[in-house]
Image: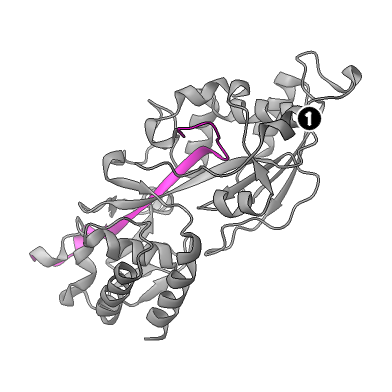
Amino acid sequence: MAAWAAGAGTLGRFAAGCTGRDAARTASGLERELRILAPRGAFDSELLDRFGADTGVRVSLEQYSARPGVTAPPADGGFDLIAFRGPAAGPLAAAGRIAAVDRSLIPRLDGLLPLFRQAGSELLAVTWSWDATGVAWRAAQLPDIPGASPTTWCVFFEPSLSGRMTMLDDPREVLGAMLLLRARSVNATDASLLQQARDDALACRPYLEGYRSRGAVPFMPDGIVVSQARSSDAARAMKSEPGISFAIPKEGGPLFAEQVGLAAAAPHPRAAHAFIDYILRPETSARLAAATGRYSPLAGGVSAGSAPALPLDRLEPVIDAGEASSLYDRYWTEIQSA
């Protein structure tokens, strides 16, 4: 896979931020405070308490609501770490809100699966959990015909399931599925490819009951047989409804990472690096994955609790589309208006 968390940054700024009075540091040389801005539910109080007990660092957490379709967190001030969901690293770096981390202060980066390692000299964001988009279905209600197979994105064009299918209310999810169906990258930026994806999405639109937000309740309303879904939502739903199954289609699926970046003006950079290293501990990473229904980015720690293992070789991390973002939004508006 191509590198997907790279961008401009400066380690010189980090070095300048490491100065301070000895009295303001813990016995391990960390600053005594750490301020984190994160999506609601990303980090619980138990995690923060454990990190504080281990390091002597007092952690304060400010949470924000990560609305569907909005990847960048709200404007921040005085924070050390900014956590976010989706492809926000590039825009945050371009806005001067995050800067490269110092790899030497995060030894556990070496434990990441190759898919989540960043080549090159700079690393702007570190993945601490992830999920992927695939197909969820109620096997007992599927008609016994080849076109109704949930192992392919083609299922959303099946007339026999008309009105009994939903897709996600997000352009990167829907257009991504259409791109994969034609063996294209989920990160395509070429206008002709995106136009084709739009046309394919419009072609399957008549067969859908509609588009639903991620995390919507109920997960699959009565009468719905097939749904495009995030693996984390499906994992939670399968606990209460054993008849639901989930899989990544044979053409592949988009992968969405939960990441954390170092604030460009972090007042406590060493404590920030220590926290990133802490959440990459195998036991901490496994607990975070199990709590959210997502997956650990560490080698040997892919499964999220009882959730099914996903085929990493068929997943592609979604990155910022840059200038093509306006095309995604434009075509999504046309699809929704059809």
Circle 1: residue type: Ala
Kindly identify the residue that appears in the image at 49 percent across and 71 percent down.
326
Furthest-top residue in this view: 27
Which quadrant of the figure has residue 194? bottom left
Asked whether residue 120 is drawn in magenta, I would say yes
Furthest-bottom residue in this view: 338
- The boundaries of the magenta stretch are 118-145
**Whether residue 12 is visible:** yes
Q: What is the crowding at mark 1: few (fewer than 14 residues within 10 Å), some, or many (at least 20)?
A: few
Q: Is residue 215 left or right of residue 16?
A: left
Asked whether residue 256 is drawn in magenta, I would say no
Give the SS element for disc 1.
helix
Q: Position of residue 94 (x, y in %)?
A: 62, 53
Q: Is residue 98 left or right of residue 288?
A: right
- Give the quarter of the figure containing the N terminus: top left
Q: Position of residue 24 (x, y in %)?
A: 88, 23
Q: Which residue is mark 1?
A: 16
Between 63 and 100, the one nearer to me in the picture: 100
**Whether residue 217 is visible:** no
Seen in the picture, residue 293 relative to 181 is either above or below; the reply is: above
Kindly identify the residue that appears in the image at 56 percent across and 20 percent down.
107
Between 244 and 332, the one nearer to me in the picture: 332
Kindly identify the residue that appears in the image at 41 percent across and 80 percent down.
336
Seen in the picture, residue 261 relative to 104 is either above or below; the reply is: below
- Give the quarter of the figure containing the C terminus: bottom left
Q: Position of residue 130 (x, y in %)?
A: 45, 43
